[in-house]
């Protein structure tokens, strides 16, 4: 069933975009894993070294920001003593299948390569998939466990401004999270029962 839905999705995509060659070529390159953007990155000997350079650069940037914030807090904020509250989280109200169906329907069509199935196909098969997704989300809330695979994002460096020098400082990281991670995040407003 999934294979048939996937095939129909691509047939519809090609039919809908038959007059837009740019969109078709971009989709073909994406499906085949090709990239025409190799010239938009700093000089590198291979993709692995470029990826590792960006990874080290962004990780160092985060460490530096945290150190600067810690220093600011230590120098400007008085010591605050926080008393433990007399309440604890008991349980979350289960999310309904209808609510999950509405969330999926309102989700943008873009997908993350980490998604096992493209978002559009999940939307097309929502009646079949919503019960399973609802159960997964409710188990996550009930057990206070956010699965590791939902925490993984693909990071893509994007130039901050066009036509700037191709050095690491001129790039910003854009993260692409899986759909289930986005659904779970949108449920963060749900209030637990407090005892």
Image (spheres, helix red, strand yellow):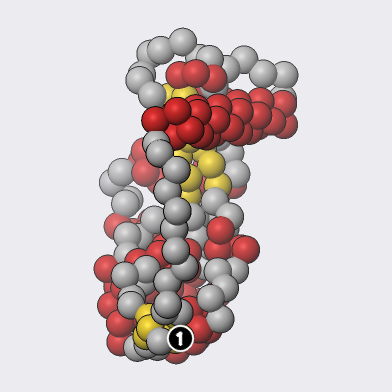
Circle count = 1
User: Residue 172 occupies which quadrant of the picture?
Assistant: top left
Q: Residue at x 54, y 51 (%)?
A: 153
Task: Note whether residue 117 is visible.
Answer: yes
Task: Note whether residue 39 is visible.
Answer: no
Mark 1, residues whose alpha carbon is within 10 Å: few (<14), some, or many (≥20)? few
Horizontal side of residue 78 vs 60, given as left or right: left
Query: Toward the viewer: 11 or 160?
Result: 160
Of all residues shown, which one is farthest toward the top? Answer: 165
Q: Residue at x 42, y 77 (%)?
A: 86
The x and y percentages for residue 156 are: 51, 38
Q: Residue at x 62, y 15 (%)?
A: 43
**Pointer 1: what residue?**
90
Query: Toward the viewer: 85 or 148?
Result: 85
The x and y percentages for residue 87 are: 42, 79
Element type at marker 1?
A: strand
Horizontal side of residue 33 vs 141, given as left or right: right
Quadrant where the C terminus sits is: bottom left
Q: Is residue 51 above or below residue 168?
A: below
Q: Residue at x 46, y 10 (%)?
A: 165
Horizontal side of residue 23 vs 42, given as left or right: left
Query: Toward the viewer: 32 or 108?
Result: 108
Q: Is residue 31 above or below residue 64?
A: below
């Amino acid at each position: 069933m999934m294979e048939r839905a996937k095939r129909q999705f691509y047939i519809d995509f090609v039919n809908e975009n038959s007059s837009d060659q740019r969109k078709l070529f971009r989709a073909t390159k994406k499906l085949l894993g090709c990239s025409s953007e190799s010239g938009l990155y700093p000089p590198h000997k291979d993709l692995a070294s470029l990826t590792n350079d960006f990874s080290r650069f962004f990780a160092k940037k985060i460490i530096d920001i945290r150190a600067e914030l810690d220093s600011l807090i230590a120098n400007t904020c008085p010591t605050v003593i926080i008393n433990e509250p007399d309440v604890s989280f008991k349980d979350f109200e289960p999310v309904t299948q209808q609510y999950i169906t509405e969330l999926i329907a309102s989700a943008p069509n873009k997908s993350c390569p980490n998604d096992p199935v493209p978002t559009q196909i999940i939307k097309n098969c929502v009646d079949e998939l919503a019960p399973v997704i609802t159960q997964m989300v409710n188990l996550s809330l009930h057990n206070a466990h956010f699965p590791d695979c939902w925490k993984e994002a693909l990071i893509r460096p994007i130039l901050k401004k066009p036509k700037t020098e191709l050095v690491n400082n001129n790039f910003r990281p854009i993260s692409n999270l899986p759909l289930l991670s986005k659904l779970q995040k949108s449920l963060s407003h749900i209030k637990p029962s407090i005892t």
